[in-house]
Image (cartoon, rainbow, N blue to C red):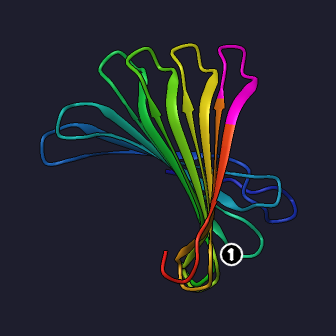
Amino acid sequence: AETKYDQYGQPIKATTETKYDQYGNPIKVETRYDQQGHPITTETKHDHLGQQVKTETKQDQSGNTIKTETTYDTKGQPLKSSETKTDSRGQTMIKEETTYDNHGQPIKSEETKYDQYGTPIKTDEIKYDQYGTPIKTEKTTYDKYGQPIKSTDTKYDSSGRPIKGSEVKYDQYG
């Protein structure tokens, strides 16, 4: 593995290294750099079922880390993906997860935002039909203790237009 630098000392060439797990499956680790010189590391490996798992990790200027992980089936279709953004202390700020059907179409996605203490403050969930059209959304907001204070559900028709909605507000007893 070799790294080359430009005249300003910024790394410009990606490096690739291949290692192997205990079962002989290759683990490919590639590091490349964004325009500000921050490393972006991509690790491609296989789980115990032989399914590909790809993980990409990058850091922004503030020291926040974004980790993206995708698991694929044996045909190369995504099964599940997640993206987690953590602050410089390692505290989760945002987590997004998407689950896919056997054709690679999303069937459910969820995003949760957290406060600086790791308590959830908002969750958005979307469910999709077989064509990738949203059919239901749920949005929940939480108080400073992580207890739900409001939940909104919306259902959609086959064209993605809202057809029914409801809202529930919670008191201190839930």
Crowd band around label 1 with a 10 angstrom C-alpha radius: few (<14), some (14–19), many (20+)? some
Total numbered labels: 1
Q: Nearer the viewer, residue 163 or 120?
A: 163
Who's the residue at 49% across and 74% down the image?
Answer: 174
Q: Is residue 85 visible?
A: yes
Q: Which residue is mark 1?
A: 63
Q: Is residue 33 left or right of residue 135?
A: right
The residue tagged with tag 1: helix, strand or loop?
loop
Q: x, y percentage for residue 167?
A: 66, 53
Q: Is residue 115 left or right of residue 30?
A: right
Q: Nearer the viewer, residue 43 or 156?
A: 156
Who's the residue at 71% across and 27% down the image?
Answer: 163
Q: Nearer the viewer, residue 126 or 65?
A: 126
Who's the residue at 37% across and 18% down the image?
Answer: 102
Who's the residue at 22% across and 37% down the image?
Answer: 25
Magenta range is 156-164
Q: Which amino acid, mark 1?
A: Gly
Looking at this view, name the residue that lies furthest to the left.
23
Q: x, y percentage for residue 18?
A: 36, 43
Q: x, y percentage for residue 87?
A: 63, 76
Q: Is residue 162 found inside the magenta-colored segment of the image?
A: yes
Q: x, y percentage for residue 55?
A: 46, 47
